[in-house]
Amino acid sequence: MVNTVLVVDDEQTLAGNIQDYLGQQGLDVHVAYDGESAIGKAERTRPDVIVLDFRLPDMEGFQVLEAVRKSRNCHFVLITAHPTAEVRERASQLGVSHILFKPFPLAELARAVNDLMGIKREARSQGHTDTGFVERRQSRSENFPLQLFDGSWVLADRRRNGARPPEPDDDQLLTGE
């Protein structure tokens, strides 16, 4: 029996990285980018676990959870970039036992999903340990390079609340070499 996961996140790069990573763990992974399509996919694919973003373009993640639970009893992992006390409390009331704050290591998400499915993770025979695929570099500026699961790099931003970007720092170049 293949364990099925539905990833619901409007950030397509993140959703694709999660799909690839969990797929390599031997899971059958489907993706939806908004709440309405997630509800439909949940009925068709019958997932064991739904990895659910709190903020979706058409509704809150909790609305998806409540709609899916009317016809399917499955587990949820909530992922959010906005970990407010209200979100955590509501998730707890709805029986969501795993909440991950963005950005998070993909290995941490895989552990949560496997835990909810009752899958014991075995040590890999290649001899390397699974430490996660999100790597951060320290920097004095507001921007910092962030390596994604697929090996690509993006320039992430530490700013909050619409702060103005700093002037260019020509001493710090991101060359990819």
Image (cartoon, grey):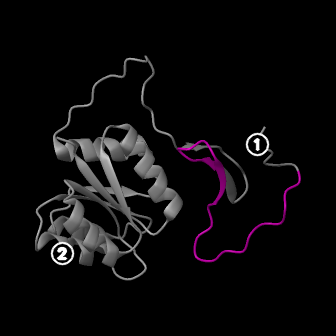
> What element does badge 2 sit on?
helix
At a point 49% along the width and 57% down the height, the residue shown is 14
154 in magenta:
yes
C-alpha separation, residue under disc 2 versus residue under disc 1: 44 Å
Asked whether residue 6 is drawn in magenta, I would say no
Q: Position of residue 13 (x, y in %)?
A: 53, 58
User: Residue 116, percent across and down?
Assistant: 19, 47
Horizontal and vertical percent position of residue 35: 33, 76
Image position of 113 with respect to 59: above or below: above
Please give the residue where the numbered disc 2 appears in the rendered image.
66
To which residue does mark 1 refer?
A: 176
Which residues lie in the magenta part?
146-170
Is 41 situated above or below 120?
Answer: below
Query: Taking 128 as reference, is 99 left or right?
Result: left
The earlier-in-sequence mark between 2 and 1 is: 2
Numbered badge on residue 109: none
Q: Quadrant of the C terminus?
A: top right
Name which residue lies at 45% across and 33% down: 131
